[in-house]
Image (cartoon, rainbow, N blue to C red):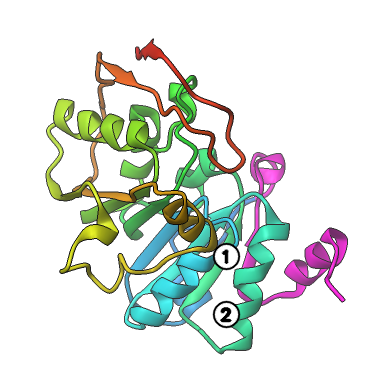
Amino acid sequence: MAKGKLQKFADMREYRNVVEHPYSVADNVEFPLAGNWKKEFFGNDNPIVLELGCGRGEYTVALARRCPQKNFIGVDIKGARMWSGATEALRDGLDNVGFLRTNIEIIDRLFAPGEVSEIWLTFPDPQMKKVTKRLTSSLFLERYGKILDDEAVVHLKTDSNFMFTYTKYITEVNNLPVYECIEDVHGRNDESEILKIRTYYESQWIERGLTIKYISFGLSKRTGFTEPDVEIELDEYRSYNRSKRSSLEKRK
């Protein structure tokens, strides 16, 4: 019998690979793992990689299987969905996987400066009308910069041409080094093992004829990011759990 949300939330509170620290308690409860994730949670000194907006945790778990020399933390506020990845990781004994149920907006409070080596953004909502909620906006880059090490990399994998184009502009206007920029991930013969990972919804988008895009860029500790002052054509299709997008909108 499928488990309901209440049971999943109960499971998550007992799972040793799950930490819960949402915004509602962040101002009142000290977060002792900040600066201590490697020693206290993983018990090793391996690099930490975050997947922000991990959903079911499919990508987090798949990355952990392919890269046992790194520690992975899936971050999302929706615990009922995250339950799937957390359960799979426990069942399969993946000790380099953890999950953090929290609001991404406070991610810089939950890790110490230099504690994180990579960030993955897998199919985030493009937030075309809300720049401040866009996960590659100047506001979020500022937050990431507070917790990343000097050689950190940010990865974006998306079905949204808007999100992909916007991110290219944000790297350009802020002089961030771009390591890879791929218009059609699954249309290449030399597709990397990591980029071959497909989540359930990614497979659905591919079946609909959408191309998957990828960009990775460097983001060391810094502040003072600038928004690109450009017009970007909005996505015209309706994606899962997203509103319909059309026309052009000036980005400020």
Q: Is 56 above or below relative to 98?
A: above
Q: Is residue 7 magenta?
A: yes
Please say if the residues under marks 1 and 2 sit with CB atoms less than 8 Å apart: yes
- The mark nearer the N terminus, 1 or 2, is 2
Question: Which residue is labeled 2 in the image?
Answer: 89
* Mark 1, secondary structure of its residue: strand
Which portion, as a residue range, is magenta? 1-29
Gap between marks 1 and 2 measured at Cα: 10 Å
- Quadrant of residue 8 in the image? bottom right
Q: Residue at x 49, y 73 (%)?
A: 61
Q: Is residue 137 magenta?
A: no
Q: Quadrant of the C terminus?
A: top left
Q: Is 204 above or below relative to 69?
A: above
User: How far from the left and from the top, in percent, is residue 191?
Assistant: 21, 67
Q: Residue at x 35, y 59 (%)?
A: 115
Q: Is 248 above or below relative to 122?
A: above
Q: Nearer the viewer, residue 6 or 13?
A: 6
Q: Is 180 above or below relative to 8?
A: above
Crowding around mark 1 (Cα neighbors within 10 Å: few <14, some 14 to 19, many 20+) is many
Question: Which residue is labeled 1 in the image?
Answer: 99
